[in-house]
Amino acid sequence: MSLETAPKHIKLAVDLIYLLETNEVEPEDVLAALKLVEDDFKHKVVQRNKQQ
């Protein structure tokens, strides 16, 4: 599978990995930040589902 035909979430993951590695962000900081991002987006999904 090429990146051009990959699903959106794969493309996003590749972009995020590139961004974080290019900026030499420490892996521990990445993991802590990703936990916050995951919690935030889970909350947004719950809120969106309540509105439907």
Image (cartoon, rainbow, N blue to C red):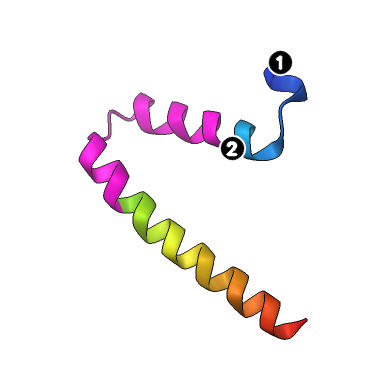
Q: Is residue 42 left or right of residue 50?
A: left
Q: Residue at x 27, y 35 (%)?
A: 25
Q: Residue at x 22, y 35 (%)?
A: 26
Q: How far apart are the two marked residues, 2 and 1, measured between alpha carbons? A: 15 Å
- Vertical placement of 8 versus 36: above or below? above
**Nearest to viewer (mark 2 / mark 1):** 1
The residue tagged with tag 1: helix, strand or loop?
loop
Q: Position of residue 2 (x, y in %)?
A: 71, 15
On-image quarter of the N terminus = top right
Q: Position of residue 41 (x, y in %)?
A: 52, 63
Q: Is residue 30 magenta?
A: yes
Q: Is residue 36 magenta?
A: no
Q: Residues within 10 Å of mark 1 (few under 14, many from 20)?
A: few
Q: Position of residue 22 (x, y in %)?
A: 37, 25
Q: Which residue is mark 2?
A: 12
**Magenta segment boundaries in residue numbering:** 12-32
Q: Is residue 41 left or right of residue 52?
A: left
Q: Residue at x 67, y 76 (%)?
A: 48
33 or 45, nearer to the observer: 45
Q: Taken as a whole, is the magenta stretch helix, strand or loop?
A: helix
Q: Residue at x 43, y 57 (%)?
A: 37
Instruction: Tell me, for residue 1, which label it has, or none.
Output: 1
Q: As shown in the figure, which amino acid type bears the numbered disc 2?
A: Leu
- Vertical placement of 21 versus 40: above or below? above
